[in-house]
Amino acid sequence: MTPNSPASGGLARQLGLRGLTLAVVTATIGSGWLFAPFYAARMAGPASLLAWVLGGGMAFVLALVFAELGSLVSSSGALAQIPLLSHGRTSGFLGGWCAWVAYLALPTIEVLAVLQYLASSYPWLTLDGGKGQVLSPAGLGLGSVLLVLLAWVNLAGVAWLGRWIEGLTSWKLVVPLVASIALMLTAGHWGNLSLDALQSGSAETGLLGGMVAAISGGGILFSLLGFRTAMDLAGETRNPQRNVPMAMALGLGISLAIYLVLQLAFLVSAPPELLNRGWGQLQLSAHGGPLVAIALGLGLTWVGKLLLIDAVISPSATAMTYMGAAARVGWMMGRCGVLPKRLGQLNRQAVPAPALLLSLAFGMVMLLSGPSWQQVVSFLTATLVISLAMGPVSLLALRQQLPDAPRGYRLPWAGAWCASAFVLSTWAISWCGATSLKGAVAMALAPAAVFVLLHHRSARVGAAPLDLRAGLWWGPYLIGILAISLSVKPLVPQLALLGAWALVILPLAVRSRLPQPSPWAQVSLPAQLQP
């Protein structure tokens, strides 16, 4: 396949570098900017700025690995293809399943963020559910309408989706910066960044523990993993070998800079009188959300109104992007035979309509369950990072399986970068907390076991091999993370053991690769490289 040819299966390549970069930015700056600065400040105080830098570093290392993979596997839904290509159908199902489940949930989470942020100004959106606020019938109706609207835009095709993304992302770049500058100039409580404030922000968990909590449960890593959207849309991108790596780097850099400005603005505009008991006790729940509460408390009514408008636009644009990404991951899994083939069909606009409608149905069901934004951030982060942990393994495996395949970007010192990325992924999975970790491991391994059992008989009669041996390392890897995280409580020894475990598993996982790339992956290889 040439770089500018139609994507495999009829997807149209209509996105350029600008459109793809904006897709990364709009996927990264979603509901996270409404809530993450508040939760990160509560967990780490002024050290939340450093937590953003560390989280950005983690995302950057992962992005380097996926930049090469994205230049090699330039098709939409690539996260579902990469583990299948290097390690066969069992690994392909497990890695693709984790990515798909997280993507299915993300549009609903963004819509819930919209409703949660607006509920204080429009109380008819929620009602008292006995154990907290839940969506009212009117709130459920509005949320459903938003999900249907997002699906309708996606069904119109990637060109129209790209135009919506460009328009909405321009707004999303301006509003956080304008609001941040206004808050800093008006409040300017620079004493909130003092050494005493730093110590009070980490008094309960320690400086390192506070930053770890902010990166995981505070929504930092959750917010910064949007770089992978470039791979999700690679099959609809012109010159993907060049544009995918560049869009990842540019989009992640722009987004991290905006988040750092937002975090700084939140820290220096928080009222000092509310910090007497430390950052961990800060409460800003009125007036539609933490940033709006600060703006209205400072008399910046226009900033509050601007933030409430953006509380609708920003998460909605992100939800629209992820609904399309979820459909493309499901589409590719259907084409690769690890999900029902019906999901691998396209409509007249070259859009995976069955997978998109399934995404919409899943979102509707999840909306009815009504989880809050923070309740699911840790779980979704763990599930997403499990799918991304396959990247370093697959890159090293494909270097040996396809050593001469053309790559638009080739990662230097790949062994060191992949080892670092695998260790960081292992840490990030563990950091999401015991409850989220247990749920994410169960979400990964239980469906994989069902997949193996259901396909075992057909594999024995020669239809489609399970490649079970190449995927067996997943079980010890994830169970080992769970065991270490639950049994070793001091953070530094826990990190050391998790890092050592990752470095033990990585070479074993690479050696378990298939002798040749899997023919079940929907990747067009040059003739001389065909296995």
Image: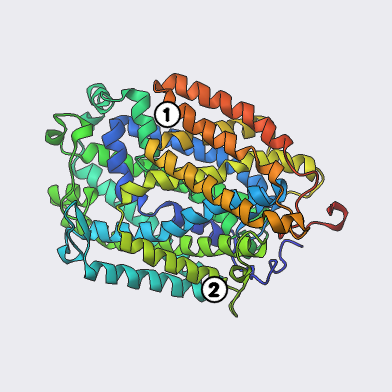
**Image position of 42 (left or right of 332):** left
Three-letter code, disc 2: Ala
Q: Are marks 1 and 2 in contact (CB under 8 Å)?
A: no
Q: Is residue 31 above or below residue 161?
A: above
Please give the name of the residue rendered at 47% of the width and 53% of the height, measured from the top-left corner: 102
- Graded by Cα atoms within 10 Å as few (under 14), some (14 to 19) or many (20 or more), the crowding at tag 1 reads some
The N terminus is located in which quarter?
bottom right
- Which image quarter: residue 524? bottom right
List the residue tagged with mark 1.
486
Q: Secondary structure at mark 2?
A: helix
Three-letter code, disc 1: Leu
Q: Is residue 451 above or below residue 350?
A: above
In the image, residue 392 lies at what x, y percent? 63, 39
Residue projecting furthest to the bottom: 348
In the image, residue 487 lies at what x, y percent? 43, 24
Q: Residue 121 got which mark?
A: none
Q: Secondary structure at mark 1?
A: helix
Q: CA distance from mark 1 to mark 2?
A: 42 Å
- Graded by Cα atoms within 10 Å as few (under 14), some (14 to 19) or many (20 or more), the crowding at tag 2 reads many
**Image position of 351 (left or right of 408):** left
- Which image quarter: residue 262? top left
Q: Residue 353 got which mark?
A: 2
Please give the name of the residue rendered at 68% of the width and 60% of the height, measured from the top-left corner: 239
In the foreground, 360 or 12: 360
Q: How many marks?
A: 2
Q: Is residue 296 above or below residue 403?
A: below
In the foreground, 273 or 203: 203
